[in-house]
Image: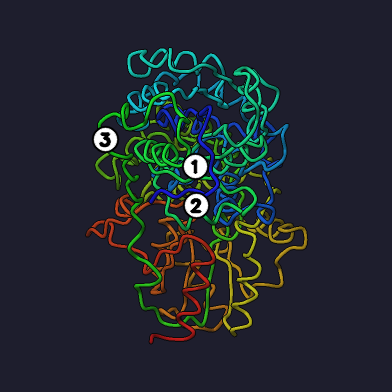
């Protein structure tokens, strides 16, 4: 529903953002982002990510956490395709201008491979822009896009029909700062010979655009082409930086101009009613991401007396060290004669597993996409590669440990509130433990190092990979843990882990399996990795996406069903 302020002034110039407002370059933009984000470590930007408690919104904090851990965009962002790289960089780096400059430069290097995939964001965009010009309104573009990209996209979009529409264009490399610095708007007004006042409208699709307009002293008009809900938009703005209008389409824009003509006669050289094109439909709402259906709000679980957690990628993030060690380890498979012991294609669970095995066998390294995703543990990798060949997996674990000694030591809490959750469980008189395939020499070092203070006092029991003859997915480690606690292996023991091996181990031990979906797999992928077939029957009892969902699930069990 279009909304506008009562004191809005008719425009002398409309300055447009480019991507997400006038044109859709999502395919190229997200391809470049997915190539650029895995470079954050090499760029020295991981440590410059904004602390989660400094983020502007809870969504921004989750984005920072996801990028810090997985070096890619959250699947919801990829599914909805509503935000720009500028929004992302401002969310994850805050006011660190140097970090954002490095990120933008790296992004541009990637974008050169993909740009040119451009189309009007909304049907009829050219017709509406032509009508605006006929009304006597000057048109401009101010964008964080570099000049080389904007000029090429102007030549490409709508078969080049847009090239003469704009009086002024200002790009990121025409000024010294990226948005939300106001220089891109002020430079456009300077070129147009117009003042920075409320008769200059900046039309953009993001919070950053509206903040830029506010800093420039012009009227911010929010173009809601991404179909955000009204309440969500309102939550972004204070009274000080709120847009003067929120429009869902270019049809709304012409409606607003027609209303202003009635309130301010002679504002336009030609009446909006005379030149407006036939109505075109607004942009379509993005398809919703399909969420897991093993949801805490649906399932009914027995209250736990014992909660056992996986370590890596559940309680803590040690992905950097793990993937470095895997990189070093795989070439050793030749001399260890492990290549010929990998599973046959017909024994793999999924087509993706078949591809992973084939790639490792041929190149002795992980496929770049697997490394970019950062969503699979070494235990899962060994399960995919060797299946039921336990001896091969034991050899692989030993050679991994040899290489892991060169990299381990850096360990971070997976989420900021993990310690609070662990302490909360203990206050509920629930026994808490850790089950990990990590060898004890590594686990004890990491346990003492996490959050600088260590978490040693938080667990009644811990079982490591070298404490039992067989590691997960075999249930031996889980069974040893409850034996140490003098507690039976039954559904009142929850095992919380992020991998298929964790789920299999829990089900084989007769315990409740809580799948920690920190990697944010969607429902179709969960159905693939937990098919529930005769050959692969094990499925989690419940899926939680983060520790806030886990804690809500715990409290629901505490209170009991209504």
Query: What residue did someone put label 3 on?
Result: 279
CA gap, disc 1 and disc 3: 20 Å
Q: Is residue 88 or residue 328 the one in the foreground?
A: 88
Residue 451, given in percent of the width and then of the height, sits at: 73, 58
Kindly tell me whether residue 194 is visible in this rendering: yes
Identify residue for label 1: 222
Q: CA distance from mark 3 to mark 2?
A: 25 Å
Secondary-structure class at tag 1:
strand
**Residue drawn 64% across and 35% down?**
41
Q: Quadrant of residue 281?
A: top left
Q: Residue at x 64, y 72 (%)?
A: 459
Mark 2 or mark 1: which comes first in sequence? Answer: 1
- The picture places residue 497, in percent across and down from the top left corner, at 48, 61
Judge whether 365 appears above or below 405 on screen.
Answer: above
**In front of the other: 519 or 476:** 519
Q: Relative to residue 473, is residue 130 depicted above or below?
A: above
Question: Which-is-in-front pick, marks 1 and 3?
Answer: 3
Q: Which mark is residue 233?
A: 2
The location of residue 136, given as percent across then percent down, is 45, 22
Q: Which mark's residue is nearer the viewer, 3 or 2?
A: 3
Q: Secondary structure at mark 2?
A: helix
Q: Secondary structure at mark 3?
A: loop
Label 2 crowding class (10 Å Cα cut-off): few <14, some 14-19, many 20+?
Answer: some
């Amino acid at each position: 529903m279009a909304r506008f302020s009562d004191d809005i002034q008719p425009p002398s110039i409309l300055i447009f953002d480019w991507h997400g407002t006038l044109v859709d370059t999502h395919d190229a933009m997200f391809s470049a982002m997915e190539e650029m984000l895995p470079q954050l470590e090499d760029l020295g930007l991981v440590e410059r990510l904004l602390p989660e408690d400094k983020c502007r919104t809870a969504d921004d904090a989750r984005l920072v956490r996801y990028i810090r851990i997985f070096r890619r965009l959250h699947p919801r962002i990829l599914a909805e395709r509503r935000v720009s790289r500028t929004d992302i960089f401002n969310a994850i780096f805050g006011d660190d201008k140097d970090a954002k400059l490095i990120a933008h430069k790296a992004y541009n290097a990637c974008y050169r491979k993909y740009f040119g995939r451009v189309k009007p964001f909304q049907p009829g965009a050219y017709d509406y822009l032509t009508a605006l010009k006929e009304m006597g309104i000057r048109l401009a573009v101010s964008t964080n896009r570099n000049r080389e990209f904007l000029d090429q996209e102007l030549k490409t979009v709508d078969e080049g029909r847009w090239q003469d529409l704009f009086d002024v264009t200002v790009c990121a490399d025409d000024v010294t700062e990226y948005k939300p610095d106001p220089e891109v708007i002020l430079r456009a007004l300077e070129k147009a010979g117009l003042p920075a006042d409320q008769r200059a409208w900046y039309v953009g699709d993001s919070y950053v655009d509206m903040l830029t307009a506010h800093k420039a002293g012009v009227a911010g008009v929010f173009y809601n082409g991404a179909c955000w809900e009204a309440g969500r938009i309102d939550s972004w703005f204070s009274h000080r930086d709120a847009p003067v209008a929120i429009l869902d389409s270019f049809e709304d824009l012409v409606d607003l101009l027609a209303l202003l003509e009635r309130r301010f006669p002679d504002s336009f050289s030609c009446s909006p009613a005379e030149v407006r094109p036939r109505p075109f439909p607004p942009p379509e709402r993005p398809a919703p991401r399909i969420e897991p259906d093993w949801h805490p709000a649906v399932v009914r679980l027995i209250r736990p007396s014992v909660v056992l957690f996986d370590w890596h990628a559940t309680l803590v993030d040690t992905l950097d060290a793990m993937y470095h060690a895997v990189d070093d380890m795989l070439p050793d498979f030749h001399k260890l004669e492990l290549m010929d012991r990998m599973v046959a294609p017909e024994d793999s669970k999924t087509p993706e597993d078949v591809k992973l095995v084939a790639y490792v066998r041929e190149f002795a390294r992980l496929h770049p996409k697997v490394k970019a995703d950062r969503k699979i543990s070494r235990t899962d990798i060994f399960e995919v590669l060797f299946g039921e060949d336990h001896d091969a997996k034991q050899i692989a674990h030993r050679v991994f440990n040899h290489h892991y000694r060169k990299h381990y030591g850096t360990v971070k809490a997976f989420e900021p509130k993990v310690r609070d959750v662990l302490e909360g469980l203990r206050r509920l008189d629930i026994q808490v433990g850790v089950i990990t395939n990590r060898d004890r020499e590594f686990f004890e070092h990491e346990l003492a190092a996490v959050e600088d203070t260590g978490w040693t006092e938080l667990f009644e029991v811990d079982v490591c990979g070298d404490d039992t003859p067989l590691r997960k997915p075999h249930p031996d480690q889980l069974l040893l843990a409850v034996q140490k606690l003098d507690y039976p292996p039954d559904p009142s023991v929850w095992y919380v882990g992020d991998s298929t091996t964790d789920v299999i181990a829990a089900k084989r031990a007769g315990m409740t399996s809580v799948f920690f979906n920190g990697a944010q797999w969607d429902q179709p992928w969960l159905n693939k990795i937990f098919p529930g077939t005769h050959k692969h029957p094990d499925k989690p009892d419940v899926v939680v996406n983060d520790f806030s969902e886990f804690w809500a699930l715990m409290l629901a069990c505490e209170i009991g069903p209504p």
